[in-house]
Image (spheres, rainbow, N blue to C red):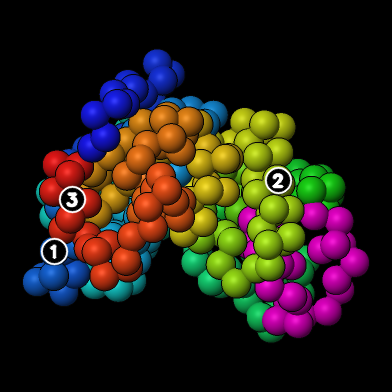
């Protein structure tokens, strides 16, 4: 790690989510997460950065309980939400406790309307405020109110808005967002991240954000973790990570005046520096 900067301690806020030294194995053979730990303070946006294959999406699925759909399991460590152990719980039980995952690739139901997709997000609720919450979603995403046809005909940006809106319909305490900028134009990326910040600010929803666009992620988050090969190798405030020379080199597209060959950007080289 760069000697000029010291890693700052996490902000002193109560942790809504705690992931403690977990290991994840797929098909009883493939070890993907190797003793991963992180904390997400209540009311904050926390970014989870890393290259493809680092284990970021697996981390979200371990939290949301979706590993079982892919023959994966947490084999060591535990996950706590609001102080309660949720390791191994069924996904619908985790949703009821206040966690909702916005999947990579949106995963909206293409042959249902926007309204039907939004109502689907409220499937665990039994109150009579669903209509009011649909109006709230439309206040953040007015384009969705205009789209009365099947969701499969929406643009990529509109589908991402629908996926986030569907998550809000569950009245979550924590939203897990997996690559919200994937496939979107730069203008739409800026718009979507602006709405993510607004939702966090207005509703107080905590967000754990997995995002390849590290610059946008650190611009929205207050704290961040960098993953390599199934474990956290660096963490700190978003401002610290944005100025860290290693993060700049490998994730923000710059490292001083010298431009390095991509052949030198090997995972083991930066792991050696960070560990």
Q: Residue furthest right?
A: 146
| Mark 2 or mark 1: whose residue is earlier in sequence | 1
Q: Which residues are magenta?
A: 141-164
Tell me the CA gap for discs 2 and 3.
Answer: 32 Å
Residue 202, position as x, y percentages in the image: 71, 32
User: Is 246 above or below relative to 167?
Assistant: above
Q: Nearer the viewer, mark 2 or mark 3?
A: 3
Q: Do the CB atoms of the residues marked 2 and 1 lie less than 8 Å apart?
A: no
| Camera sees residue 232 | yes
Residue 179 placement, left or right of 130: left
| Mark 3 or mark 1: whose residue is earlier in sequence | 1
Q: Which residue is mark 1?
A: 31
Q: Residue furthest left?
A: 29
Q: Do the CB atoms of the residues marked 2 and 3 lie less than 8 Å apart?
A: no
Mark number, residue 271: 3
Q: Residue furthest top?
A: 12
Q: Nearer the viewer, residue 266 or 84?
A: 266
* Quadrant of res 152: bottom right
Q: Which residue is mark 2?
A: 194
| Camera sees residue 24 | no
């Amino acid at each position: 790690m760069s000697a000029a900067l010291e890693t700052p301690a996490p902000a002193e806020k109560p942790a809504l989510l705690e992931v403690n030294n977990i290991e994840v194995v797929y098909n009883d053979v493939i070890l993907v997460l190797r003793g991963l730990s992180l904390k997400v303070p209540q009311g904050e946006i926390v970014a989870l950065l890393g290259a493809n294959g680092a284990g970021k999406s697996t981390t979200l699925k371990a939290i949301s309980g979706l590993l079982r759909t892919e023959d994966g399991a947490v084999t060591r460590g535990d996950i706590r939400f609001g102080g309660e152990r949720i390791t191994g719980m069924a996904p619908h039980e985790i949703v009821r406790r206040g966690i909702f995952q916005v999947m990579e690739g949106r995963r909206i139901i293409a042959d249902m309307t926007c309204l039907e997709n939004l109502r689907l997000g409220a499937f665990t609720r039994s109150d009579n405020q669903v209509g009011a919450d649909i109006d709230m979603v439309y206040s953040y995403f007015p384009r969705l109110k205009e789209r009365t046809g099947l969701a499969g005909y929406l643009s990529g940006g509109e589908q991402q808005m629908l996926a986030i809106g569907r998550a809000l319909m569950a009245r979550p305490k924590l939203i897990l967002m997996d690559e919200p900028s994937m496939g979107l134009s730069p203008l739409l990326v800026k718009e979507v991240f602006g709405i993510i910040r607004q939702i966090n600010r207005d509703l107080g929803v905590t967000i754990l954000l997995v995002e390849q666009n590290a610059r946008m992620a650190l611009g929205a988050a207050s704290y961040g973790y960098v993953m390599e090969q199934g474990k956290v190798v660096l963490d700190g405030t978003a401002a610290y990570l944005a100025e860290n020379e290693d993060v700049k080199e490998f994730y923000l597209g710059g490292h001083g005046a010298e431009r390095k060959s991509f052949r030198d950007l090997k995972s083991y080289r930066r792991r050696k520096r960070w560990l």
